[in-house]
Image (spheres, grey):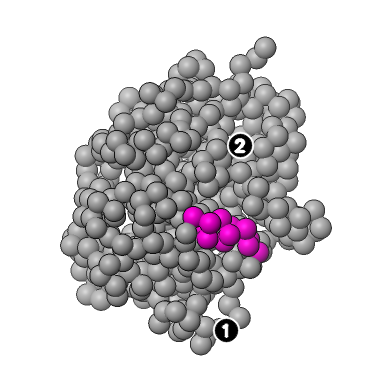
Amino acid sequence: MQQRKITLSESEIPDKWYNIVADMPNKPLPPLHPGTREPIGPDALAPLFPEELIKQEVSTERWIDIPDEVRNIYSLWRPTPMYRAHGLEKALDTPARIYYKYEGVSPSGSHKPNTAVAQAYYNKQAGVKRITTETGAGQWGSALSFACQHFNLECEVYMVRLSYEHKPYRKVMMNTWGAKVYPSPSDRTEAGRKVLAKDPNTTGSLGIAISEAVERAATDPDTKYALGSVLNHVLLHQTIIGQESLLQMEKAGELPDVVIAPFGGGSNFAGIAFPFLRLNMTEGKKIRCVASEPASCPKLTRGQFRYDFGDTVGMTPLLPMYTLGHNFVPAPIHAGGLRYHGAGVVVSQLLKDNLIEAVSHDNLEVFQAGITFARAEGIIPAPEATHGIATAINEAERCKREGKSEVILINLCGHGNFDMKAYEDYFAGKIQSHELTSAEIEASLAELDTPTV
């Protein structure tokens, strides 16, 4: 029988997170104060994050110890399995060897608890009583609700209105773990009321939801804020995925030629790709790492590298990143993730330095890829995950054309069991091909008055 599942033992759960900043040839540019536009230090983050997370955010150390209590909670679902995708290979008739790391086995069904548990732990250690956050498709809000429940912390989630309406069971999942969930924009914050006054019928955006959650944390001394992607410490926590993947690929006797992951803000991609990029930067390997984003929100492939706010209202520091502009509101196509206007600072610098690649796919292509995968492998992927699958299919077809037997590794970041509405819409022909026009992107970027790089 062909080897299909590559497993690790509980003792092989990594005991350190990998910080890629230590090995980057060009370090990220500093964040700027939103008012003075001058570089800021770690102290500026104190109203939002506990001290230990701030230390990780600015660290240049290569390895950060994973606390035993965090690692113990990880063991509820980690190490996660890796599979050889024999069914998909057969369906594509490709000489490529395709593997996927499956993060959908976590309690909330995605990779997000890898950082949610860590962030909840450090907030609890700091005496914080409540954490606020935003969520788009609901995966991050679910993960943080799960983590806060473990540490007896209150959790307040601002969920993008489109997803709040289309994904009621994600909301119920958060409620089950004790979180309070509000559709964003809401009337609970000044930021939300400002947006609603301008457009009462808005479907919301991650940038707006971030503004609401940040405002709540900044105005309450017992409350801190948690972000599910973008920031350095978040990407750091996710590298447990790639470290496990290295061990599993070694057990399979392989090393990937191409590592692929969906891209929203960066945590999914960074989680699997950064440990492999370390081999490129320190051992001279030539592993291609490809970020796969939606054509309806193409910041890496069509955005501009410049300073921009992480939120819509402009409460966060200015970050050097690829962006479509903080006022960007994604088209209400379906309640999927990967709809954030910007990209993580570290990922942006890596792309600027041509150390990683980025591609985009439209809605119809990714759903078809997800269905192809589900019928070949049995797992129905989250809409976010289908982007990485679409890229992998393209790479596998390239291998077939070129007669190359390359090794392709995908981060299958979550299952789609809560996303049946999106699949239903696809089968009913309600999901249309959508790609932003150059005029739309230029109009959004034209609204920026932030510094260029």
Left/right of residue 84 with respect to residue 27 in the rendered view: right
Magenta stretch prevailing secondary structure:
helix
Mark 2 residue type? Ala
346 or 398, nearer to the observer:
346
Q: Is residue 329 above or below residue 93?
A: below
Q: Report the span colored magenta.
A: 166-177
Q: Read off the residue under disc 2.
A: 392
* Position of residue 257 measured from the top left corner of the image (x, y, whole percent): 50, 27
For the point 75% across and 36% down, the residue is 375
Cβ atoms at labels 1 and 2 below 8 Å apart: no
419 or 293, nearer to the observer:
419
Most extreme residue toward the right, as rendered?
Answer: 428
Mark 2 Cα shell of 10 Å, populated few (<14), some (14-19), many (≥20): many
Q: Read off the residue under disc 1.
A: 200
For the point 57% across and 61% down, the residue is 171
**Which circle's residue, 1 or 2, is located before the other in the chain?**
1
* Position of residue 336 measured from the top left corner of the image (x, y, whole percent): 60, 57
Q: Is residue 346 visible?
A: no
* Position of residue 218 measured from the top left corner of the image (x, y, whole percent): 29, 71
* Position of residue 227 measured from the top left corner of the image (x, y, whole percent): 39, 57
- Quarter of the image containing the N terminus? top right
Mark 1 residue type? Pro
Q: How far apart are the two marked residues, 1 and 2, measured between alpha carbons?
A: 40 Å
Q: Is residue 37 magenta?
A: no
